[in-house]
Image (cartoon, rainbow, N blue to C red):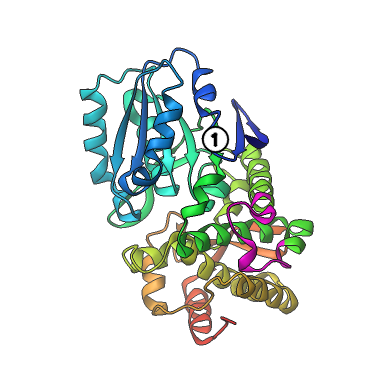
Amino acid sequence: MKLSEREIVGSGFRYPIELHEDFVGLSEKLSSLKKVSHIFVLTNREIAGIYEKYITKELKNTSIPFSFIYLKAGEKNKHIDRVKKVYQQLIAEEADRNAVIVAFGGGVVGDFAGFIAATYQRGIRFVQVPTTLLASVDSSVGGKVAVNVDSGKNMVGAFYQPEFVFAPLFTLSTLPKKEWSCGIAEVVKHTFLDGGLFLETLSKRKRSDFYEKSDTVRYAIEESVRVKASIVAEDERESGLRAVLNLGHTTGHAIESLTAYKKYSHGEAVSVGLVTALLLSKSILGFSETNFQTAISMMNQLELPTDLDEKPELVLQHMEHDKKKDGNTLKFVLLQDFGKPKFGVPVERKMILEILKLHKGMKLNG
């Protein structure tokens, strides 16, 4: 059953983002696409082991042939080295320009499948079927697709919009705690960017309020999609405003890279990165101490990591691989206030290191 729908509209693109209880209705959506020659479901074996029988049953309701392509689970497998094997499978199965890729999984699968779709035969259609909270609130929306290289995350990618996003909340029932943290961290990021009622409402919630059938989860997804869709609609290719969605990501990506994507989930790293961004916001833009404490209290209530455990010098070293480096400065997204982000704020190496050391010395987890 469809629970809600929001449309994302930008310059040259328009597509729906739908929340559903389960997979029912996916076949109808796919059948509505014109001239589909073959459906390729790109997923990982972990997800397939739980849900492949359900999605197979749904796809059989179409008259379109379909196949599965399996990616190994984990961020380290969203690597450019994995791309060749997928291209070869598509070629072996005679995938043409009318083939459609279904990205069935979390953010790693969505990013990777979108990159394949954007580049195979100069671009074929794809759809997003996110199975995690993170993918539902963030990576499935907006059309940023990418793969990692040895020296950095998402360094090779494209802006490529899906035909639609179909989010079955049923799949959240099997998420481990780490994956819930991933999604909740991005929801919190969206509340900081938006401020107002969204922030006020989520600041009253506890971690136990987040489960697959809860009103809180539906509200968090719907509002996060609203925030992200409004930003992407104005700036699809991150030439300006869209950069605010990187709040917390400069430090977060550095921590992920430093720890070889093994110690932290993406959302956990971003959560720690949000604190660094808030500390920089206090020092540079006058973000208030009251707001800082509100943010930390909210993150603690939601059981998100806030402490920096890595060596500041090493974090800074990995930051310098970031796409936002400019000479001796790195550009950050910071907050003047909740709901008032500022992007492209240049911060010198010396100050970044000072703030990282300050963060390292603080014990913020409740």
Secondary structure state at the residue bearing disc 1: strand
- Where residue 155 appears, as percent x and y from the top left, is 37, 49
Magenta segment includes 339? no
Up-down relation of residue 235 to residue 107 (above or below)? above
For badge 1, the amino acid type reads: Val
Residue 158 place in picture, x, y as percent: 43, 38
Q: Which of the 4 quarters of the picture holds residue 37?
A: top left
Residue 204 belongs to the span the image colors magenta: yes
Residue under the image location 67 percent in, 64 percent down: 335
Task: Place residue 344 in its image quadrant.
Answer: bottom right
Q: Is residue 230 left or right of residue 113?
A: right
Q: Quadrant of residue 40?
A: top left
Q: Position of residue 17 (x, y in %)?
A: 60, 35
Start-end of magenta stretch = 202-218
Q: Residue furthest right?
A: 197
Farthest top residue in view: 35
Q: Position of residue 188 (x, y in %)?
A: 63, 61
Q: Pointer 1: what residue?
A: 165
**Residue under the point 39% across and 44% down:** 109
Q: Is residue 329 visible?
A: no
* Placement of 169 over or under 347, stated as above or below: above
Judge by depth and name the residue closer to the eye, 211 or 257. 211
In the image, taking residue 66 as reference, residue 128 lies left or right, namely right
Report the quarter where the C terminus lies. bottom right
